[in-house]
Image (cartoon, grey):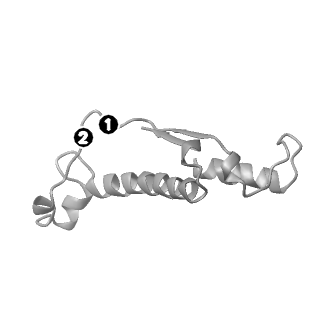
Amino acid sequence: CLLAIGDITKEIFSGNPDFFPIKPMDYGRFLVISLGTGSSKVERKYSAKKAAKWSVINWLYDNGRTPLVDVFSQASADMVDLHISVVFQALRSEQNYLRIQ
């Protein structure tokens, strides 16, 4: 979603005639629907109490799960959603952004 907004902004800056006259940073005129892949069928929760006892190996692989990869993947998606939400809120256009997971 963030990359798509960036690409659209580049096209507007370059004067692409496929885009109607719009100011490059006028995100208030954007309508964004971000569709996620959904959450996994098995929700993976890690407790701080359990994780505090993990070794390096457990962070990489624990009972068929990959905690470190899971944490970074989810954090990345959450940060992009948060960033876009804040941008649209700052522009008083929060109704123009919808995230469906």
Mark 2 touching mark 1, by CB under 8 A? yes
Nearer-the-camera pick, 98 or 16: 98
Q: Above or below — where is 64 with respect to 53? A: above
Instruction: Point out the residue furthest to the front here.
Output: 92
CA–CA distance between discs 2 and 1? 6 Å
- Binning the other alpha carbons within 10 Å of mark 2 as few (below 14), some (14 to 19) or many (20 upward) gives few
Q: Quick one: SS at disc 1?
A: loop
Tell me where residue 65 appears, x and y as whole percent: 24, 47
Tag count: 2
Residue type, label 1: Ser
Image quarter hosting the C terminus: top left
Q: Is residue 95 left or right of residue 68?
A: right
- Binning the other alpha carbons within 10 Å of mark 1 as few (below 14), some (14 to 19) or many (20 upward) gives few
Q: Is residue 52 left or right of residue 27?
A: left
Q: Above or below — where is 24 with respect to 29? A: below
Instruction: Point out the residue furthest to the top here.
Output: 41
Q: Quick one: SS at disc 2?
A: loop
Residue at the disc numbered 2? 43
Residue 64: mark in rendering: none
Give the residue displayed 79% in from the left and 50% down from the top: 11
Tell me where residue 10 appears, x and y as whole percent: 76, 55
Residue at the disc numbered 1? 40
Residue type, label 2: Glu
Give the residue displayed 54% in from the left and 55% down from the top: 89
Nearer-the-camera pick, 2 or 46: 2
Give the residue displayed 44% in from the left and 51% down from the top: 77
Tell me where residue 83 appears, x and y as whole percent: 51, 58
Q: Is residue 43 left or right of residue 87?
A: left
